[in-house]
Image (spheres, helix red, strand yellow):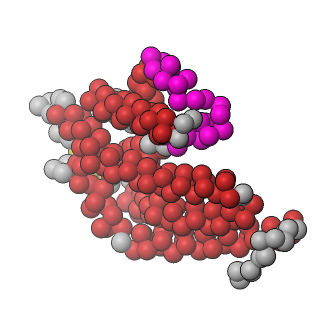
């Protein structure tokens, strides 16, 4: 159960461990409940994830493929939907050990990180996935009929969504580096030539498809995110 700790009282190592155990337990319960709910509504989730590939026929190529893929998708979705609550529990655990000055930065950074992660997922779902799938469908459609494996498609779409969400954390990394005075906004701007090359490489690595359209869009998104990180640091005088 939650214990009220006097902020002026130093907690012992055992109290810290008890608090950590409690936070992990609460976060785990929330993850399990959301994952079970996602599995129960798997048909609805599968329908949503199939929208970027409208018109494509999906096959079950092995016994139990749909079942095992459903479990995998439920786990990913459960983690995704419970991640804000998990981060909230982590924040509650580390907050008492932070100074007021540190709290002023940590809480906004965590909130912005969550927003950027979900923004990346939406960006991948609305823009990247349709662009990649249309390119792959149209390429050679006169020769082969696109009939895809249910499991391989969901591996593709989940990887694209999560990798894009992680890529959208670039401004957060920049802000942390700026606050810690490891790199200033001026130094980050000075490396713009290398950033363009790096954005191209990162886009090629994190996008599961090899089509140029998706990689160009992802590269531009990374450059915009990097530029926004520099602008924010300029505003913070870092």
Residue 61 is at least partly visible in this image: no
Q: As rendered, which of 74 and 164 lies closer to the eye?
A: 164
Q: Quadrant of the C terminus?
A: top right
Q: Quadrant of the N terminus?
A: bottom right
- Res 42 quadrant in image: bottom left
- Res 216 quadrant in image: top left
**In the rendered view, does 126 fall on the left or right side of 89?**
left
Q: Is residue 77 above or below residue 148?
A: below
Q: Is residue 98 above or below residue 213?
A: below
Asked if the stretch drawn in magenta spans residue 171, the answer is yes
Residue 102, position in %: x, y?
A: 67, 53
Residue 57, position in %: x, y?
A: 21, 51
**In the rendered view, does 140 fall on the left or right side of 58?**
left
Residue 54 is at least partly visible in this image: yes
**In the rendered view, does 174 fall on the left or right side of 11?**
left
The stretch in magenta equals 170-194
The structure residue drawn at horizontal position 45% and vertical position 50%, both measured from the top left corner, is 117
**In the rendered view, does 164 fall on the left or right side of 47?**
right
Asked if the stretch drawn in magenta spans residue 40, the answer is no
The structure residue drawn at horizontal position 33% and vertical position 45%, both measured from the top left corner, is 124
């Amino acid at each position: 159960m939650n214990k009220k700790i006097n902020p002026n009282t130093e907690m012992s190592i055992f109290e810290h461990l008890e608090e950590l155990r409690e936070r992990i337990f609460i976060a785990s319960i929330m993850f399990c409940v959301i994952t079970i709910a996602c599995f129960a509504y798997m048909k609805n989730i599968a329908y949503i994830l199939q929208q970027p590939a409208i018109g494509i026929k999906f096959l079950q190529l092995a016994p139990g493929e749909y079942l095992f893929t459903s479990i995998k998708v439920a786990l990913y979705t459960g983690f995704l939907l419970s991640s804000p609550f998990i981060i909230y529990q982590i924040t509650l655990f580390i907050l008492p050990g932070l100074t007021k000055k540190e709290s002023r930065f940590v809480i906004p950074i965590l909130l912005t990180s969550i927003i950027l992660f979900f923004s990346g997922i939406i960006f991948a779902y609305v823009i990247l996935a349709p662009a990649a799938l249309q390119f792959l469908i149209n390429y050679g459609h006169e020769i082969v009929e696109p009939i895809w494996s249910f499991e391989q498609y969901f591996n593709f779409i989940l990887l694209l969504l999560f990798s894009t969400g992680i890529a959208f954390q670039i401004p957060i990394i920049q802000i942390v580096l700026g606050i810690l005075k490891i790199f200033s906004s001026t130094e980050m701007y000075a490396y713009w030539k290398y950033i363009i090359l790096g954005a191209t490489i990162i886009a090629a690595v994190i996008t599961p498809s090899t089509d140029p359209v998706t990689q160009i869009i992802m590269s531009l998104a990374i450059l915009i995110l990097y530029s926004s990180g520099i602008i924010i640091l300029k505003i913070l005088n870092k």
